[in-house]
Image (tube, grey):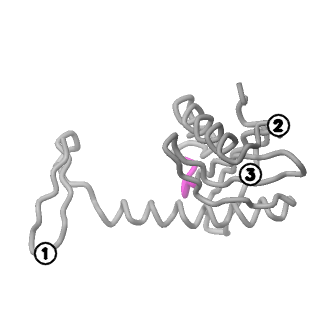
Amino acid sequence: MYNTPQQGGARIERCEHLPGGTVNAAMAHERQLLGIDGERCAERFVRRQRYVILQRNYRCPAGEVDLVALDGRTIVFIEVKTRTQEDFGSPLDAVDLRKQRQIRRAAQYFLSVHRLHDRDARFDVVGVWREQRGIRCQLVKNAFEVE
């Protein structure tokens, strides 16, 4: 599916299923930077809501969670979605069922490793929009069920 030939010392990614076959590496890097910037903005935003950040970019064999925080005594697993245009849909809509399952698995792993199963937990989503006027954040508490 993917191959990465070297041309002139630069790595060019090719993907058979895309028209023209070339993935624009600069755009991919730009999206990655947008996501990192969005996570930083989201972190500042939830801190202002009096959350205490326990961990950023928590990764484990079960998956990853952008932010793990405390809201009072409740452990909150926060997914951050950043957009530059409304045309691509709300960042909040981007947390589909597959992503929810992955976040739940990572959360269960976190709770197990840290022996925190006796604590209340929830899943929040922070939507971050980068607009010409600045950055806008929206927090959705209990965005999906713990199960």
Q: Is residue 90 left or right of residue 121?
A: left
The residue singled out by tag 3 in the image is 138
Q: Earlier in the sequence, mark 3 or mark 1?
A: 1
Q: Secondary structure at mark 2?
A: loop
| Amino acid type for the residue under numbered disc 1 | Gly
The residue singled out by tag 1 in the image is 9
Which label's residue is closer to the chain start, 2 or 3?
2
Q: Is residue 60 magenta?
A: no
| Magenta extent | 82-86
Tag 2 near tag 3, CB within 8 Å? no
Q: Amino acid at mark 2?
A: Asp
User: Residue 121: x, y in percent?
Assistant: 78, 39
CA separation in Å, label 3 and label 1: 42 Å
Mark 2 or mark 1: which comes first in sequence? 1
Discs 3, 1 touching: Cβ within 8 Å: no
Left or right? Give the position of 102 relative to 32: right
The residue at 72%/57% (across/down) is: 137
Residue position for label 2:
118
Question: Which one is in front, 18 or 64?
Answer: 64
